Amino acid sequence: MRYQVLNYKKIAHVMMINIFDTGSDQVRVAQLADELTDLCNEIIWDEEIRVVALTGAGEKSFSIGIDSIGAAPRIRSLAEPIWKLDQPVIAVINGDGIGQGLELALACDIRVVTETSHFGLPHIETGFIPWDGGTQRLSRLVGRGKALEMILTGEMIDAQEALRIGLVNRVVPVGELMEVAMKMAHEIASKGPIALRYAKEVVYKGMEMTLEQGLRLEADLYLLIHTTKDRTEGIQAFGEKRTPKFEGR
């Protein structure tokens, strides 16, 4: 399918998604939501895709304005399609993460950014609140106090502060962003796809459970892996001192 506000490319087991700058154009934001939903629905069922790298075609691709959101005929989530993916998702941010763009990045599992990046949820400045998961995912990621500070003041933070509070995972020079991010993506993709999905599942679901329930889920998924061909391949490859060839079975 040909998309208008994003493009994509599959490199080995990594799906690379480039989103275009939509700014405050709510028609384009809604179109991006539709296209992300369509593409993510395909990714979920593609067994060859083990990792998704979400980046922007420009420095403002993750700066999605909220000043015209009240006039939008429909409020469309950008974060939800990404959040539903079973595969690990890396946000590769080559600019600022602002408004709904930051909420989209929060729906990813890992965030790699540049030294010059800034982040904020300025919704409060125009009388709104974050609505695409920002209030929930930010607080779970950086803690209630820092999340409230960012949301209630609407102030921006720089990349180093974002790294310090755990909002982002890595801060790299602008010229090294894609190299670092894609190296990470391919490194993760080389691991067993079943183990990757289960690890992601147990971390997220475990956060909503008691410790006892989370430990039980962890043990159950660990035992399930023992029934797979990938587990056998991993053990054999280790014994033979070679790179395992996982098939996701």
Image: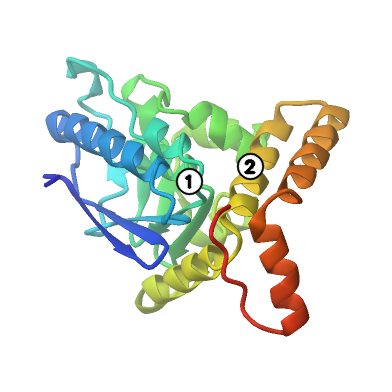
Q: Which residue is mark 2?
A: 142
Residue drawn at (78%, 40%), measured in percent from left and top? Answer: 218
Q: How many marks?
A: 2
Q: Give the mark, 2 or 1, whose residue is nearer the N terminus.
A: 1
The extreme bottom residue here reads 241
Residue 166 can be seen in this image = no
Q: Is residue 46 above or below residue 29?
A: below
Q: CA distance from mark 2 to mark 1?
A: 14 Å
**Where on the picture, by quarter, is residue 116?**
bottom left
Residue drawn at (62%, 73%), measured in percent from left and top? Answer: 244
Q: Is residue 192 left or right of residue 154?
A: right
Q: Position of residue 207 (x, y in %)?
A: 71, 33
Q: Position of residue 215 (x, y in %)?
A: 84, 37
Residue drawn at (24%, 23%), measured in percent from left and top? Answer: 69
Between residue 92 and residue 227, name the one nearer to us.
227
The extreme right residue here reads 212
Counting other residues with Cα less than 10 Å from the Cα at mark 2, is it few (<14), some (14-19), or many (20 or more)?
Answer: some
Residue type indicated by callout 1: Cys
Helix or strand or loop: what does disc 1 sit on?
Answer: loop
**Disc 2 or disc 1, which is closer to the eye?**
1
**Where on the picture, by quarter, is residue 26?**
top left
Residue 143 badge: none
Counting other residues with Cα less than 10 Å from the Cα at mark 1, is it few (<14), some (14-19), or many (20 or more)?
Answer: many
Residue type indicated by callout 2: Val
Helix or strand or loop: what does disc 2 sit on?
Answer: helix
Q: Is residue 243 above or below residue 14?
A: below
Q: Is residue 17 left or right of residue 135?
A: left
Describe the colour scheme in one phrase: rainbow
Q: Which residue is mark 1?
A: 108
**Where on the picture, by quarter, is residue 102?**
top left
Residue 194 can be seen in this image = yes
